[in-house]
Image: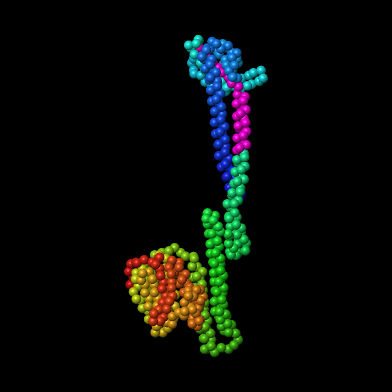
């Protein structure tokens, strides 16, 4: 069953219950009021007889009512209509119970008739015990109640039908944005292109749903575009070392006689290219698995920096590595990924420093600063250095795939931080990695 049909049924059901309760209440109230009016009329007629019971002969006209007077034994004293008394009526006549009123069915020459009966004791001041009974034909009252039931039934059915129609119209109008969302989702599922948008308008929940749906589509479109660009860039970057590897392997397998020096040079090239391939694949895996993060843990960022600096001293022995104070800092995050990001920063700085260069590393206030004394960033390169696969003209002659700083940005953003690159005063590059949101002062670093 569709949502529109369910809403229509709910609306019709609610109206049906409300109308049924209202009609039932109206019917029972009217029936009670008619009964009260009948009893009031019968009571007046009984009181008229009670005022002078000896004068009543059974022939008086009481406005359509029938009156009967019986003694304590149930014998009729005077009557314009007679109904055989039962035990309750005889008890009133004997004075052992008070009067009452009720509906009864009596037999007549034309068949059964429905009557309203009022039984009242005869005052003992006017003679022996007895009872005065007044009857009123219920034919007109029952007809009025039947007409009322018929009218209320029509009102109920009409109200339910109107509620169903109104519910269908209202639900159709209210669910129109949902149908547009559904149609858009089905088209996107069929075509695989999330470029479509649904119309937005209003300030209700469905309007916000449409806006959220469009935001989701925009994010999905951007994600797919990023994925396509990533695959294209990765394919392009992998093609060059693969082609070089294949060429060198073909030469080694060929029939050409190679000198030992030439063979050793080819093997060195294969080793270098395989190392580049390894680094490139590791970088691609790091970027591809950026969203598949493990649980966060608490770690000392200053210890991580100190360990990575020691690795950098081994990797770049001709560079002077200076740690200008590593402030004890605790970070809630991913230690392995942060270690990779710090290493990428130091490796980039060491690569550009050259023999005899120096790199200063500092950590204070949740900010890691890495400054080298190399050529720095060209103005046209600085806005792009954190993009995937971007390599400046000067970097193309050096090993690498342009993923190091891109990985740094991915890791920093995963920790809620920022990273910025600029040219330092006096020359060289300065990269600042800020973790204000995830970092806080911690215990002293281990020696």
In the shown orientation, is residue 215 left or right of residue 360? right
In the shown orientation, is residue 183 left or right of residue 303? right
Q: Quadrant of residue 420?
A: bottom left
Can residue 430 be seen?
A: yes
Say above or below: 348 vs 186. Answer: below
Q: Quadrant of residue 103?
A: top right
- Give the residue furthest to the right: 110
Can residue 280 be seen?
A: no
**Residue 138 colored in magenta in the image:** yes
At a point 41% along the width and 77% down the height, the residue shown is 430
- In the image, residue 115 lies at what x, y percent? 59, 22
The one nearer the camera, 369 or 384, is: 384
Quadrant location, the C terminus: bottom left
Say above or below: 164 vs 176. Answer: above
At a point 36% along the width and 69% down the height, the residue shown is 365
Classified by dominant secondary structure, the portion drawn in magenta counts as: helix
**Residue 442 colored in magenta in the image:** no
At a point 55% along the width and 17% down the height, the residue shown is 133
At a point 61% along the width and 43% down the height, the residue shown is 162
- In the image, residue 428 lies at what x, y percent? 41, 80
Say above or below: 112 vs 243. Answer: above
- In the image, residue 81 lies at what x, y percent? 60, 16
The one nearer the camera, 68 or 286, is: 68
User: How many numbered discs?
Assistant: 0
- In the image, residue 64 lies at what x, y percent? 60, 19
Residue range corresponding to the magenta coloring: 129-156
The one nearer the camera, 60 or 298, is: 60
């Amino acid at each position: 069953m569709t949502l529109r049909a369910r809403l229509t049924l709910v609306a019709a059901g609610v109206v049906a219950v409300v109308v049924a309760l209202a009609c039932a209440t109206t019917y029972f109230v009217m029936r009670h009021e008619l009964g009260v009016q009948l009893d009031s009329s019968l009571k007046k007629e009984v009181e008229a007889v009670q005022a002078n019971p000896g004068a009543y002969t059974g022939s008086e006209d009481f406005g359509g009512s029938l009156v009967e007077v019986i003694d304590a034994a149930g014998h009729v004293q005077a009557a314009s209509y007679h109904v055989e008394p039962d035990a309750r009526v005889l008890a009133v006549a004997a004075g052992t119970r008070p009067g009452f009123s009720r509906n009864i069915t009596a037999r007549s020459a034309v068949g059964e008739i429905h009557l309203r009966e009022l039984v009242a004791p005869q005052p003992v001041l006017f003679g022996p015990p007895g009872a005065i009974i007044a009857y009123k034909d219920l034919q007109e009252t029952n007809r009025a109640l039947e007409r009322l039931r018929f009218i209320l039934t029509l009102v109920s059915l009409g109200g339910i039908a109107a509620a169903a129609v109104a519910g269908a119209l209202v639900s159709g109008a209210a669910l129109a944005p949902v149908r547009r969302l559904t149609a858009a989702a089905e088209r996107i599922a069929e075509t695989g292109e999330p470029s479509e948008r649904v119309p937005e308008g209003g300030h209700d929940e469905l309007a916000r749903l449409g806006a959220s749906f469009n935001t989701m589509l925009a994010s999905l479109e951007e994600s797919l575009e990023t994925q396509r660009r990533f695959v294209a860039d990765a394919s392009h970057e992998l093609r060059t070392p693969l082609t070089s590897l294949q060429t060198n392997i073909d030469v080694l397998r060929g029939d050409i006689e190679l000198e030992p020096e030439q063979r050793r040079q080819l093997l060195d090239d294969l080793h270098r290219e395989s190392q580049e391939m390894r680094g490139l694949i590791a970088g691609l895996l790091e970027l591809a698995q950026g969203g598949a993060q493990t649980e966060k843990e608490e770690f000392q960022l200053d210890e991580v920096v100190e360990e990575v600096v020691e690795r950098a001293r081994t990797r770049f022995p001709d560079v002077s590595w200076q740690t200008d104070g590593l402030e004890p800092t605790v970070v809630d995050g991913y230690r392995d990924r942060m270690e990779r990001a710090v290493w990428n920063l130091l490796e980039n700085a060491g690569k550009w420093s050259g023999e005899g260069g120096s790199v200063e590393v500092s950590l204070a206030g949740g900010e890691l600063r890495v400054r080298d004394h190399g050529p720095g960033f060209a103005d046209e390169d600085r806005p792009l250095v954190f993009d995937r696969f971007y390599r400046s003209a000067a970097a193309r002659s050096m090993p690498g795939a342009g993923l190091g700083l891109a990985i740094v940005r991915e890791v920093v953003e995963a920790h809620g931080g920022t990273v910025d690159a600029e040219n330092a005063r006096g020359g060289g590059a300065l990269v600042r990695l800020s973790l204000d949101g995830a970092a806080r002062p911690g215990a002293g670093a281990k020696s």
